Amino acid sequence: MRTTTLTFPELILIAATRGMLGAGLALLLAKRLSDQQRETAGTILTAIGLLTTVPLALEAFGKSERH
């Protein structure tokens, strides 16, 4: 079994980046904005979500301990 210990700020960062990723994907699929606005906002949020989630996930999994 693996155990990972995260601090509260790390947990908030992970949740926020996942939220940005989800918001970006939702904008890419939504129809309320013009095509150009939706594509721009969705692409930016998705990129930010992905680019910030990967390093945080690597850090979190790097703290895992085998028991």
Image (cartoon, rainbow, N blue to C red):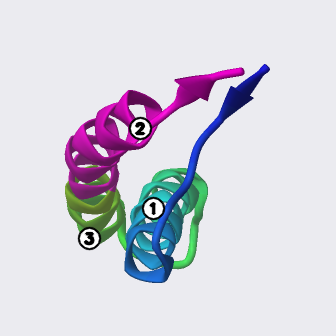
Q: Residue at position x 72%, y 21% from top? A: 67
Q: CA distance from mark 2 to mark 3?
A: 39 Å
Q: Is residue 33 magenta?
A: no
Kindly identify which residue carries mark 2.
63
Which residue range is magenta in the image?
46-67
According to the image, label 1 marks what residue? 14
* Residue at left offset 39%, top offset 63%: 17
The vertical placement of 48 against 56, above or below, is below
Q: Residue 29 at x, y = what percent?
A: 57, 52
x and y percentages locating residue 12 in the rendered image: 47, 78
Q: Nearer the viewer, mark 1 or mark 3?
A: 1
Looking at the rendered structure, the kind of residue marked 3 is Gln
Residue neighbourhood size for the residue with mark 2, other residues' Cα within 10 Å, grouped as few (<14), some (14–19), many (≥20): some
Residue 33, quarter of the rendered image: bottom left
Contact between labelled residues 2 and 1, with CB atoms less than 8 Å apart: no
The amino acid pointed to by label 2 is: Lys
Residue most toward the right?
A: 1
Instruction: Check disc 3: other Cα within 10 Å, few if <14, some if 14-19, many if 20+.
Output: few
Q: Determine the residue located farthest toward the front in the rendered image.
A: 67
Label 2 secondary element: loop
Q: Foreground residue, 54 or 43?
A: 54
Residue at x-position 42% and y-position 43%: 60
Where does residue 48 sit, x and y in percent of width and height?
A: 22, 56
Q: Main secondary structure of the magenta part?
A: helix
Q: Quadrant of the N terminus?
A: top right
Q: 15 or 29, which lies in front?
A: 15
Point out the tag, 2 or 3, that comes first from the N-terminus. 3
Q: Which residue is mark 3?
A: 37
Label 1, label 3: how many angstroms apart (C-alpha)? 26 Å
> Gap in Å between the C-alphas at discs 1 and 2?
14 Å
Which dot, 2 or 3, sits closer to the camera?
Answer: 2
